[in-house]
DNA sequence: TAGATTGTTAATCGATTAACAATC
DNA sequence: TAGATTGTTAATCGATTAACAATC
């Protein structure tokens, strides 16, 4: 393990490597090379080798990378060798979709609570979960020690809720609301906004 | 307008500027500065000025940028000064959520069709739309001249459907399936995978 | 052994930042 | 006029690529 600061741009690619390796593993493959991985991902082989080598020597000359071993190492590096409790704030269509999404568990996440500020929605069942009142958000999150939240609420209330999440000790926010959030330095935010993503492509049409 | 090739990384930031300006405009603001915009977005003022100046001189020394004018220009540059027809493939929870999402229209997109390969779902009503059979995808998309698709299907069928979309003339794909897609050079793909996004933050926890 | 592929170095390429003249 | 802020240049910083010795 390297003590120097690893660039964010490298950390951002590791989940892609992890995902591709997980697919290969499910298909029964036992080893791969930087070239093969690169072709699947549209990333150069040199970059993949360089990224991975930041964290240790996980490959072998001549034979490449053992998939189960590299999977373990990447999970360890990304800290998804465990199951993180995650909450959803906002029980609209997107909140529903995320609450029912089956793809979290085998990638390190477990949705444990869903909140809404609409009293009509509080108490509603979504899969295994029951919608809780946003008024109890800070207390419940703090008590449970939850560090990760997904925001599926209107932009107009997103900063308010974010401030509460930060107060409650959340350090990672996946924001589906179409607005930039202000957070302290030690809190990470990732943005998912379909319209923004579409607008990144129309330029080229 | 500059004839040189504009870097992708700049194009990727323009929708964020557009979104922030749209908010400001809705709040009745008439002008802003690179500094103010930068603070809202967590981007340096120098970078914002440099990005915008790639396309022309849209500001004024001493007073900054007129919001309505810059909005117009950014929409024109990104080609969202019009309404693009978009399809959704996959009528599961995520497809439903996108089909009902109200945030597309005033950002340049109009969802016109939704497809599924499950005969039980074909014919189902979602908002104004009726689920169509994926078997008719290529023909319907080609006839309608649609260039943009959102994919909310399982990873296992994502590449197959992508190949069909490419065949039908689609040039921009927003992919919610957790897998990397192969497409020709003239087709753009954007990826939305909540687990990947979460894994980009756990490293820092 | 011969072929394949890593890890790493050095070179290249590209993006960001700082600074400031121009000017509203 | 004085203050503010752009557009742009040059300097800095960082990321990617090419190449190859090491070695499985």
Image (cartoon, coloured by chain):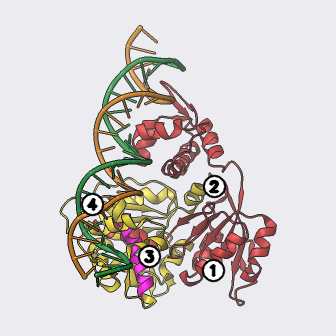
Chain colours: A red, B yellow, C orange, D green
Q: CA distance from mark 4 to mark 1?
A: 36 Å
Instruction: Please tell me whether mark 3 or mark 1 is closer to you in this view.
Output: 3
Give the magenta range: B13-25
**Side (left or right) of A43 relative to B60:** right
| Residue B36: mark in rendering | 3
Count of labels in the image: 4
Instruction: Please tell me whether mark 3 or mark 4 is closer to you in this view.
Output: 3
- Coordinates of residue A117 in the picture (x, y in percent): 69, 85
| Residue B6: mark in rendering | 4
Dominant secondary structure of the residues highlighted in magenta in the image:
helix
Marks 2 and 4, the one that precedes in the sequence: 4
How crowded is the residue under tag 1: few (<14 C-alpha within 10 Å), some, or many (20+)?
A: few
Which sits in the foreground, B84 or A159?
A: A159
Q: Secondary structure at mark 3?
A: helix
Tell me which corner region of the image, top left, top right, bottom left or bottom right, holds residue A26.
Answer: top right
Which sits in the foreground, B97 or A83?
A: A83
Proximity of marks 2 and 3: CB atoms separated by less than 8 Å: no
């Amino acid at each position: 393990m390297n003590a120097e600061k690893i660039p964010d741009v490298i950390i951002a690619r590791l989940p892609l490597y992890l995902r591709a390796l997980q697919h290969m593993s499910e298909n029964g493959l036992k080893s791969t090379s930087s070239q093969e991985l690169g072709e699947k991902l549209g990333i150069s082989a040199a970059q993949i080798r360089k990224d991975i080598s930041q964290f240790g020597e996980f490959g072998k000359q001549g034979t490449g990378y053992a998939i189960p071993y590299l999977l373990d190492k990447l999970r360890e590096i990304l800290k998804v060798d465990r199951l993180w409790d995650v909450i959803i704030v906002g029980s609209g269509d997107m909140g529903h979709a995320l609450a029912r999404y089956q793809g979290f568990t085998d990638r390190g996440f477990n949705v444990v609570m869903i909140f809404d500020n609409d009293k009509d929605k509080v108490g509603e069942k979504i899969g295994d979960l029951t919608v809780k009142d946003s008024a109890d958000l800070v207390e419940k999150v703090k008590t449970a020690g939850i560090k990760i939240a997904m925001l599926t609420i209107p932009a107009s209330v997103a900063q308010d809720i974010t401030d509460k999440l930060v107060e409650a000790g959340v350090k990672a926010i996946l924001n589906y609301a179409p607005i930039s959030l202000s957070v302290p330095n030690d809190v990470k935010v990732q943005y998912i906004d379909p319209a923004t993503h579409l607008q990144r492509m129309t330029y080229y049409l």
